[in-house]
Amino acid sequence: MAYENRDRVKIGLEIHVQLNRLKTKIFCGCTTNYHGDPPNTHVCPVCLGLPGALPVVNRRAVEYAIRVGLALNCGINEHTQFYRKNYYYPDLPRGFQITQYDYPIAQQGHVTIEGEDGEHMVRINRAHMEEDPGRLVHEGTIDRSKYTLVDYNRSGIPLLEIVTEPDLRSPKEARRFLDKLRNILEYLGVSDLDLEGSVRVDANVSIMDGNRTEVKNISSYKGAEKALLYEIVRQKNLIRRGKTVTQETRHFDEAREITVSIRTKEEAHDYRYFPEPDLVPLRVRDWVAKVKEELPELPDARKERFMTEYGVKAEHAKTLTGQLKLAQKKQ
Amino acid sequence: MITREDVRRVGWLSRIELEDSELDEYSRKMGLVLEYFGVLDEVGGDVDPTYHVLEIDNVFRDDVAGEMLSQGDALLNAREKRDGYFKSARIV
Amino acid sequence: MSIDRVRELVDSVGIEEVLHRCSERIEENKLNTFITTDFEGALTRARKRDGNGGGRLQGVPVGVKDNISTRGIQTTCGSRILTGYVPPYDACVVERLKAEGAVIIGKTNMDEFAMGTSTETSYYGSVRNPWGRERVPGGSSGGSSAAVAGGEVPIALGSDTGGSVRCPASFCGVVGLKPTYGGVSRYGLISYANSLEQIGPIATSVGDVALLFDAIGGYDRRDSTSAEHEFDTSSALDSDVGVEGMRIGVPDEYFGEGTSGAVRDSVWNAIHTFEDLGATYEIVSMPHTRYALAAYYVIAMSEASSNLARFDGLRYGYRVEEGDWHTSFSRTRREGFGEEVKRRILLGTYALSAGYHDKYYLKALKVRTLVKRDFETAFKSCDLLLAPTMPYPAFKLGEKIDDPLSLYLSDVNTVPINLAGVPAISLPCGFEDDLPIGLQLIGNFFCEPTILRAAHCFEQSTDFHKRKPGDV
Ligand SMILES: [Zn+2]
């Protein structure tokens, strides 16, 4: 039976994943195992943005990004490069973030999930590499704090931003997508997603073809479903009362499990993207085939194999392959 | 050519505080320069832009740990610090 | 003062005495060439290395432009916003100078963030020209050039984004080289316009410039735009080789309206000198030269607006505490940057902003392609190009500073070289009212040996470099 999606819920996700299985940061030799260490001890002139220091791309970070791109059935751009995204925040040591814009490493993929009505395909718009900013510590809440403390240990941790099309039709599908993604990333060995701050999710949500809101600051997989449930109910209530949904950015308050409107002083963003002059273009054509060859068996393929080779039933195979450790034990 | 409002907006985008009394002078001098930049409009024909003069590509470093600064050196030049952190004014 | 002469002095009177003489000279000259000197540190460092010195610059005092990071020595970029900033690391070129035994005595004055042609935009005051104290030394490496011309140091480092080594070399009657883009590592050079700039050597002779270039140049893995090219400058100064048969192109467009009669004459005399030495010349046309200046400034300002975004007072430098973060940030920059820097950041932000990006920034990069092609065409029939470095000799302090556009127009013969990325050298070729005139020799990519050889031959057959400035 086809899923009705009566409220015409459309959810698109932007997932920031730390490629924290890498030993070092994306543009410098600082180590990525900063968790639990004192602030500003995994830093160098490059990731502190000291004047004159220059970035150099971590080869494995690109390889990992290609791995993920292939696993998400994306096309890998033969020519890819880094851009500067200009905006200001104390966690951003250079006053711009080095990211990708035109020519991201991976584009146009898809992932199949267990949807509301059976198999459901979620299209991947793109996946691009970028650097993580530092971490801010507020005394109390962000709007009450007298000052802000800044730790740059996280600055420059390699991130992959994965952007889906608005193909998810319910918070449950969003959660299943995230579970699936987590599973894939663990199989690929690029990320340890148990580490704090290893995943951040932003979600675009609209219902009844109305305006969409962007919900930011979803810092866990579990949080995602809650944030989306709240946001959909909020939008439904607005429409029921004859109001329209405002197109805006909202913050997920994890403690209160609600989304709140954030009005920043920075009215309209103007990121003034331009190619990072300190980095040269990447041509990865020769790499892709090699990375593809070395790709481990992914959950879908393994599930298939468990069913055919071992005669395991579909449900059981899914449970088995849904967790990397169980799947390895079965091997 | 560039209005007071433009200058104010660009000032905000650049995070450079400008006083109202300065806007006219900025817009006049910037206007002269922008007028001069107008010479670029004379150039026709579509060619590819040159971002890098040398055709270098695929420059990488290996995923090998390098030298890091001590916390003391990292914070050495900061005017305000606390407990090993840089201390910034409140965000909002 | 030559490197050889200084090395002899070090051997005869000792490093302490040599450093003492440098310091005295700086004090007597009062040209305001240095923002920071560190003679005590210099002596300590020199002594530490005493005995194991096999370096080609062993004991040679050197001035380093204040936009090049020096571990433990304040590095201000000529700006208030970096007052008190002490880098915890050395630039690549500084490491290489040290490895050759050079002794860094201090950081030279410069236009704020290298944005200027006269060294008048420095927060630390203008530099005076040793050939006429009421004249500018050129910029932005005015401190380095004036220090070399004034006999304070035998060699110095500058940086050249649009002529910032060649212009002051020309105005101060010394030799300055802008290397091929990628020829010298930018690691540790505080960026003004990354895609255009290179660190370059300044000295009193072509030979010393070649030696200094040899010491600092070559591949560095920390700069992704660094070229894996091995320069061989050793034969460049071999007097047996000469310029016999060398084909020199003279670009018509580099003798524009504003060029002074004396500059025109001196440069043409130089062309005839080369003819006498066995070279041939032809007039070449570089039709996109008239667009180069605008394209250069658009690109430089755009890159600068982003490069200078990091100066927020949080991690280093000047800081104003006022309200929330964005307010503190904006006020810090209001007070920390000078007028010219602010103007360039504003213009660069404008040129990159939504709605203007294609009209200014992208268009400038397309024009850059055309300018580069002009050079490619010229180098099909020529081994090098020859032109005035500056259209006129050093102008008066205060003469142009209130009119940014007229100051920009001074760079008309130097910026096309940075747009194309090719190397160029400036060396003395005459005088106008006792002020030096500079000759510019421009080479193809990585053809530093060619222009150094030609410059050396010219120097050997003329006396311009022997004349000493009168006002020190
Ligand atoms: Zn680092």
Image: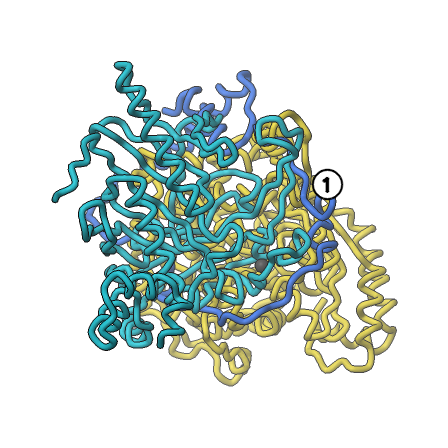
Image side of residue A231 versus residue C457, left or right: left
Image side of residue C126 versus residue A177, left or right: right
Residue under circle 1? B79
Front residue of B72 and A263 = A263
Q: Is residue C418 above or below residue C293?
A: below
Front residue of C335 and C370 = C335
Q: Colour of chain C?
A: yellow
Tag 1, which secondary structure? loop
Q: Position of residue A255 (x, y in %)?
A: 52, 34
Q: Identify which amino acid the numbered label 1 is placed on.
A: Arg
Q: Is residue C228 above or below residue C41?
A: below
**Which quadrant of the figure has residue B71?**
bottom right
Q: Is residue A10 visible?
A: yes
Q: Colour of chain A?
A: cyan
Q: Colour of chain B?
A: blue
Question: Residue at (39%, 40%) from the top-left corner?
Answer: A272
